Amino acid sequence: MSAAGGRRRVLFVVRGRLGDTVAAYATVRAWKDAFAQDDVTLLVRANYAPLFAREAGIRVLGAGGRLSMRLRAAQLRLFEPDFDALLVLLGSGPEIEILGRVLRAARKLFLDARYAPVFPEWPEMPPEHIHSEPAWRVAALYEPRLAQPRRSSIPSLAALRRPGNAVGIAPASDEARRTLSPAALRTLVAALRARHPGREIRVLVNPADALARPLRAAGAPAGARFVGFPTLEALIAELAQLEHLYSTDTGLHHLGCAVGVPTTTFFGPTQPWKNTFPEQPGLARVRLAGLGGAHCEVKDCADPVCLERAIALHAGSAPDTSLARVPTACPMRGCAPGSLERLAAPAAAAVPVH
């Protein structure tokens, strides 16, 4: 059934970490905005369902692990009409297979061929693509008229914004190589105190995050305070009050952008062009010029000198120019002389989407 010919029942499945989930949601939002008449359901991890619960025109369902997914699939099969399309935009594992086997849908699409017996359709993926592109390609295989999202937004959360006199810092990621050291955090706080006079500086940390513990153990830098967010609702409330967010490449960066918070994101080993939307409003990307658009494969790096140096340059401080702490395989060792003492031009941070 075409969009012109009537209403389609479409089930989108997004199961991933916070940042991945927010990025994939851009495709769901773009679909509903483009095809308002369609009956759109979004199935996400239960703990992320509150993020999208108030989104206009989209029914949001949550599911946890394997048993929860099986129960959710059974409910949909027993009590609702068949779907026109089941589109898995993000996720893998037994829970996805369960969903594909239990639900009835005229077409079932997945990200690749790994579940071909259950999901017989998948898109071709270019070797170089932005982080949010696979989700869109799955949806566009079913509906070729769907334009690729160029920015991220959760309008219902953006409507909650009431910027106050606070500036936020999100210093921790799920990788040590993307987490600020206590020294880098102190450098950043000192710069923000001068850049945002009269503003409270809040360092947002999840109390359960192991990589945030060294930061907390070192104590809050002068002029800043730690703010925990034990629940997703508490995190949204914090973001809604911020005048600006300074973040490493982590889920809070993606959520802050989607909520509409002006954001400055510091990139160390990861690629600014890949991990952001190319036309994200209010986003500034900061990375060492020498690293360009390359990705670092040193996964076990626990001392991200690249991140520390980028923050120092952004703060106007003199960075440590020694490579003594840099791992042997780090791309910094192959950079041209002088390219690690300056930041990349903003235009180099994004590439056109397909």
Image: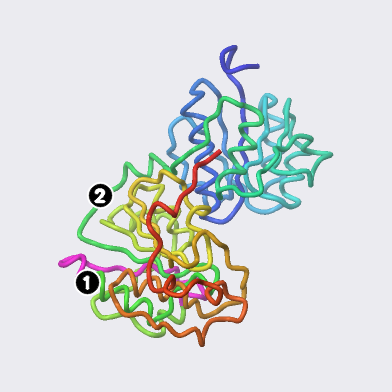
User: Mark 2 highlights which residue?
Assistant: 162
Secondary structure under badge 2?
loop
Q: Where is residue 104 in the image (x, y as percent from the top left)?
A: 74, 30
In the image: residue 304, left or right of residue 111: left
In the image: residue 6, left or right of residue 111: left
User: Mark 1 highlights which residue?
Assistant: 193
CA separation in Å, label 1 and label 2: 21 Å
Q: Confirm whether residue 208 shows in the render.
A: no
Name the residue: 54% across, 68% down. Answer: 174
The region drawn magenta spans: 194-212
Name the residue: 46% across, 28% down. Answer: 33
What is the three-letter code of the residue carrying label 1? Arg
Name the residue: 47% across, 41% down. Answer: 53
What is the three-letter code of the residue carrying label 2? Arg
Quadrant housing the N terminus = top right
Q: Where is residue 43 in the image (x, y as percent from the top left)?
A: 60, 41
In the image: residue 58, left or right of residue 117: left
Identify the mark nearer the N-term, 1 or 2: 2
Secondary structure under badge 1?
helix
Q: Crowding at label 1, few (<14), some or many (≥20) Cα neighbours within 10 Å?
A: some
Pick the front one: 192 or 241: 192
